Image: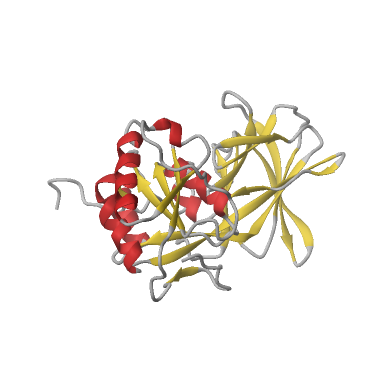
Amino acid sequence: MTQRPEASPGASSPGAAPEVRRIGVTGSDTSVRLHDALKRLQGFASSRGIALLPEEGLAETVESELGSETLSWEEGAVDFIVALGGDGTLLRTGRLAAGLGIPVLGINLGHLGFLTASPAEEMEARLEQVLAGDYHLDWRSALEATVTGPEGDEEPSLAWNDVVVHKRGEARVTRLSLSVEVRGEWQEVGSFSADGVIVATPTGSTAYSLSAGGPIVDPSVECMIVTPICPHTIAVRPLVVPATQRVRLQPIEASEELVLSVDGQVVGRIGGSGSVQIAQAGLRVPLIRFPGQNFYETISRKLDWAARPRGGA
């Protein structure tokens, strides 16, 4: 079932369903529903002769053995991966699976579950659909964020929700300069004071960026969304930048407290003389989606977009 990314983004159909022999499993050990979901998944796989390969450490969360072999993050290691948890678990799984061409099925054990494909109650039915080939792949873009300091570039960090530049700890104002690469040359857009800046993928447009006032963007659009966090002027508004360009963020005032967060996790310190360059990554994350599931149905159902007030006209 493992497939390579297509040249163009968006949804794709795998056609005839290949035989599924190995399923990878990831999960959030903070979920109170994880134990039950793992046992149900184990029973489903066992009855069909399918091997389960849990990520390292996951098997210890249940009383019975999931399998002697653990999930390795290599191309062709499994036919697809089931991510048990909320959107955080799916984001982590997607980052690890990006570039491997391994489809990811999100089963929501949390509350909102905007990215996860299905609730826990539908797990067995959705797995049957995957085995039957009754699904399509939704290829999601990702970002690469690179911190540049006096000693050169650090290792790029991958995000497929958002990259955030902010001060560590409590919400504190910082002054930043924003530049965009236009035809190979850096052009300064402007400088401003804010609590930080979010650079999001279209997938991440419905997460932190949305809460900070950014637009909702269809995941098939090739772009980055730059959203200042609580800017200290009404003249600063979110920007939508083509995915073919790069964004650079530089601190105007030296601060050792400025950090880089990727998908909600702090991954590095920017430092007083550093900068962050953000570009669309060459890797994509294939999410498993089912007939009837689409972006607009999801924002209507999960976010109550344009919903009428109860009892209103």
Extreme top residue here?
Answer: 170
Extreme right residue here?
Answer: 151
> Residue 251's quadrant in the figure?
top right
Q: Position of residue 262 (x, y in %)?
A: 60, 42
Who's the residue at 74% across and 45% down the image?
Answer: 155
> Residue 33's quadrant in the figure?
top left
Which color scheme did the rendering employ for the protein? secondary structure
Q: Is residue 191 left or right of residue 218?
A: right
Q: Position of residue 242 (x, y in %)?
A: 61, 63
- 117, above or below 66, in the image: below
Who's the residue at 78% across and 30% down the image?
Answer: 254
Residue 107 visible? The answer is yes
Q: How many marks?
A: 0
Q: Is residue 131 left or right of residue 103?
A: left
Q: Position of residue 243 (x, y in %)?
A: 62, 63
Who's the residue at 56% across and 68% down the image?
Answer: 4
Who's the residue at 39% across and 43% down the image?
Answer: 84
Q: Position of residue 111 (x, y in %)?
A: 32, 39
Extreme left residue here?
Answer: 311
> Residue 176's quadrant in the figure?
top right
Q: Is residue 175 left or right of residue 198?
A: right
Residue 238 visible? The answer is no
Q: Nearer the viewer, residue 60 or 144?
A: 60
